Image: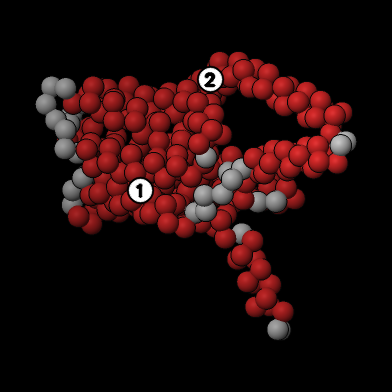
Amino acid sequence: MDGIPHKARHFFHEYRALMILGAAALLAELAYAILNLSAMPMYVDKELHEFAHYGLIFGTFLAVEAVSRPAMGAIGDRIGRKPLMVAAPAITACTSYATIQVGGPLVVPILVALRALDGLGSSALWMNAFASIGDIVGEKHRSAAMSVLNVTYMGGMALGFLLGGAADDYFHTLRASFYVASGLFVAAFFVMLVFFPAGKHRHDEAHAGEVAAVLEGLAAGRAGSKLRKKLTAFGAWLIGIPSSFKEVPDMVAMAVVTFLGM
């Protein structure tokens, strides 16, 4: 029995970052589901009487999210995952509130622009959330960690309809679900900002170890051949960067085909 508290402490210490990431992702996806699947269709139809344009509005969100995911992944590799995962819910918390403040003859273009910002936020969040699994979880448990993140995604989508409709029914207004979504985005923002660790990528640590090994070899007078090998490997790594960006059109095409298949 004495070993149970120790095992529990070890479990929470090892998977603390994953649990924080899962909680923030669940809050954010729940908010996205409320906003795009529950609140927006009813609001555009019943209050704005612009349901004929809802396909354009929601399609903009999906298209921008799909197209921007490769870029968000590349930015996350450069500046780190956490800044993007913090900024994403903050942006959509603002756009959720702004959605119910706009009106007039330009309401459709404004909603399209707001949903484009939401698409950027969603791609920044989910692209870097899945990529961060490699930074916070050991290699043996990454598949399980991916499954946890997928559960939060599907759970958020499943509960979005329920909570969005319940909020509108309770407060007797179609605007209530927008406030709920905005509040959930704010909660996800603070969870990610305060609790999620801003650690270095594992590949950054590997590069640092390689540099240290080269310096030790120089001090021992054995670094000639090692340095050439390291420089060759580093050069190959640099050459491979442009080729990764060449895959972006293929990724976009795959996203479009998947979306049309749905």
Q: Position of residue 177 (x, y in %)?
A: 27, 48
Q: Is residue 233 left or right of residue 170?
A: right
Depth check: 157 or 244 in front?
244
What residue is rendered at 44% in x and 28% in y? 65
Instruction: Determine the secondary structure under disc 2.
Output: helix
Question: Residue 222, can we see it?
Answer: yes
What residue is rendered at 47% in x and 58% in y? 195
Residue indicated by mark 1: 185
Q: Position of residue 204 (x, y in %)?
A: 64, 40
Image quarter in which the N terminus is found: bottom right
What residue is rendered at 68% in x and 41% in y? 208
Which numbered tag is attached to residue 14? none
Q: Quadrant of residue 235?
A: top right
Depth check: 98 or 240 in front?
240
Q: Quadrant of residue 45?
A: top left
Q: Is residue 262 left or right of residue 206?
A: left
